[in-house]
Image (cartoon, rainbow, N blue to C red):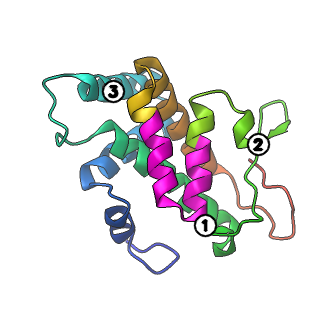
Amino acid sequence: MQHKSGNSLRMHEERAGITRSDAVMGGRLLALAHENDYAELTEEVAALVSSTDSDSAAPSTPPFYGGVLKWTVTTIADVVVDKMGPEVRSDETFELTIRTEEGRQIRPEELPQPEGTVMKAVVDALAGDTTAVRGDLDQVAFAMDWASRMEALVEAVLWLDRLLDTPAPDRNDDAPPW
């Protein structure tokens, strides 16, 4: 499968430190979100977070929560690039804002935690700062409590699902429709 950049998606995932099982689990979670199967989505994420917390789970046991979260974040960034154009990658003037259900536009730092940290990771991924992305996601995966980790991944997957269903904005429009 090819990305619009011409690089294969698998190459991109391997460079980002994402395993095939991380991507498969991320795709499964995305399919559940797309089918509006929120009960199964939350159960799958809860099991993933719990298995990561378990003493019996070896760190190399795939899929790892952090890898699935990283796959989701980098996929969100890739979709933004696909919809907005390759010029948003590493463009320091590009600002990502979120439009709430009420129509208000907010900046990533205005979001509550853990969503704010996940959004910062997306912004860092767009900037090409893999060290910052890793730091952002490590903060979620290792420094936040169980419920916050669960919320972060569920919200990221739901955001990715909505973003995939959102039409690309007119290139002359200043505000993206999401």
Alpha carbon distance from label 2 to label 3: 28 Å
> Which residue is pictured at 54% across the width and 58% down the height?
125
Q: Is residue 26 above or below residue 141?
A: below
Amino acid type at circle 1 is: Asp
Q: Which residue is mark 3?
A: 49
Which quarter of the rendering shows the N terminus? bottom left
**Are the residues flagged by discs 1 and 2 in contact, CB closer than 8 Å?**
no
Amino acid type at circle 3 is: Val
Could you tell me residue 119's position as x and y percent? Answer: 61, 43
Q: Decide: few, some or many residues near mark 3? Use Cα within 10 Å; few <14, some 14-19, many ≥20.
A: many
Query: Position of 14 compared to 101: left or right?
Result: left
Disc 1 versus disc 3: nearer the observer: 3
**Is residue 126 found inside the magenta-colored segment of the image?**
yes
Report the front residue among 165 and 64. Answer: 64
Considering the numbered disc 2 on the image, is that residue within a helix, a strand or a loop? loop
Could you tell me residue 21's position as x and y percent? Answer: 25, 49
Residue farthest bottom in this picture: 6
Considering the numbered disc 1 on the image, is that residue within a helix, a strand or a loop? helix
Could you tell me residue 141's position as x and y percent? Answer: 40, 34
Report the front residue among 104 and 59. Answer: 59
- Earlier sequence position, callout 1 versus callout 2: 1
Q: Is residue 134 above or below residue 53?
A: below
Q: Decide: few, some or many residues near mark 2? Use Cα within 10 Å; few <14, some 14-19, many ≥20.
A: some
Alpha carbon distance from label 1 to label 2: 21 Å
The magenta span reads: 119-139
Q: Which residue is mark 1?
A: 82
**Are the residues flagged by discs 1 and 3 in contact, CB closer than 8 Å?**
no
> Which residue is pictured at 49% across the width and 23% down the height?
148
Considering the numbered disc 3 on the image, is that residue within a helix, a strand or a loop? helix
> Which residue is pictured at 52% across the width and 75% down the height?
4
Give the numbered dot on residue 107: 2
Query: Position of 9 compared to 103: left or right?
Result: left
